[in-house]
Image: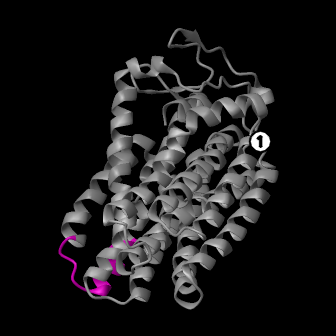
Amino acid sequence: MWRLGRRGQDLPVGSNTELDGHSTQANDPSQDPPDGGYGWVQVGACFTVNCFTWGQVASYGVYLSYYLSSNAFPEARPLDYAFIGGFNFALAMLAAPLVTVVARKLGTRAPMAIGVVIQTAGFVSASFAGRVWQLYLSQGLLIGVGLGFIYVPSIAILSQWFSKKRSLVNGISSAGSGIGGLIFSFAIEAMIRNISLAWSFRIIAVITGVMNLTATMLIRNRNAIIRPPQLGFDTKLLRRPDVLLLLFWGFTSMLGYITLLYSLPDFADSLGLTKTQAASIAAYLNLGTAIGRPLIGVASDRFGRLEVAGLLTLFCGVTCFAIWIPATSYGILVFFAILNGGILGVFWMTIGPFLGGHCAQTTSAAVF
């Protein structure tokens, strides 16, 4: 296992090296991750969490395309819909310090169960929304906060169960968001077209509620064995240049990630494509995500997490200028969606394993 050193270098966990005033002694062998066994159940549980949290968020572009082309909320501006989608990401991450404190006091499952209730309530209440401010509170606030309560406690789980293939299993887990986005992109468009917007919310509420509750019951941490420190927010980390650079990379990469994720279906609309084709662009993007993320995990384990993350972030930016902006046809857009879906959000595959080597629960929740 590896951890982030004071200068940003990877150091083996168990080395007697001081970090922020605390010395780390050699690990007890009984604390080593089992690298298998019930850990594979955890991979399945975390895959399910990603599928039915970030997966449904990744399909927001279908809702956005519908909102912009319909008169469902007459007083709403395009900026309102952009904010509502952005709230899903922002509130999920802003809730992290609170969720970490709750998880420290009540364990992993309690905050996740709370999140399932909040997220489900968000979908159900969104189905009754008649004004845009009600959509802000339901599809924006409640779903975003619920997502944070479900997802944040699960961040450190796989790093506690795996060491040798940590990036691989995190890649498999994060591929769940691609599978979920693929399914939800087609399903939501079909439900809105054939049933109604309101019933699409209600059906999604039932599906995500049941699946996330199942994952919650299967989740098991190893905190009692490894006893990781759990801080709501560690201000000492903000004094470190390497952490500040990592935060800057996370901020800029997520800004581009959300822009691309939410804009592609509406961009397809602007090219004169049909609603079904626009929804399929979002689905192809998520298909690329499902295929690419495990491969990025393998590459990260072999070539280094920083190196892979930096190279793919650059490549993603170049392809946006070289392929996306000049795109004028459905075929080119499909190619771009699959290609970039595979590397989009490389942050998620690398940040957890990268920080988890030392103390995933503290760093990932306290900083990110």
Tell me if I can see residue 1 in this picture.
Answer: no
Above or below for 259 versus 155: below
Above or below for 153 versus 263: above
Residue 284 is situated, as x and y percent measured from the top left of the image, at 44, 77
Residue 46 is situated, as x and y percent measured from the top left of the image, at 67, 53
Snapshot colouring: one colour
Q: Residues within 10 Å of mark 1 (few under 14, many from 20)?
A: some
Residue 330 is situated, as x and y percent measured from the top left of the image, at 31, 86
Q: Nearer the viewer, residue 223 or 68?
A: 68
Query: For the magenta stretch, what is the residue range?
Result: 325-338
**Could you tell me which residue is drawn at 47 percent across and 19 percent down?**
235
Q: Nearer the viewer, residue 80 or 217?
A: 80
Q: Nearer the viewer, residue 1 or 288?
A: 288
Magenta residues, dominant SS class:
helix
SS at mark 1? helix
**Is 211 on the left-hand or right-hand side of 75?**
right
**Is 37 on the left-hand or right-hand side of 35?**
right
**Could you tell me which residue is drawn at 47 percent across and 56 percent down?**
296
Kindly identify the amino acid type of the residue bearing the numbered disc 1. Answer: Ala
Tell me if I can see residue 294 in this picture.
Answer: yes
Q: Is residue 41 magenta?
A: no
Residue 312 is situated, as x and y percent measured from the top left of the image, at 34, 54
> What residue did someone put label 1 on?
110
Above or below for 244 versus 296: above
Q: How many marks?
A: 1
**Is 13 on the left-hand or right-hand side of 209?**
left
**Could you tell me which residue is drawn at 39 percent across and 56 percent down?**
83
Q: Quadrant of the N terminus?
A: top right
Above or below for 360 versus 87: above
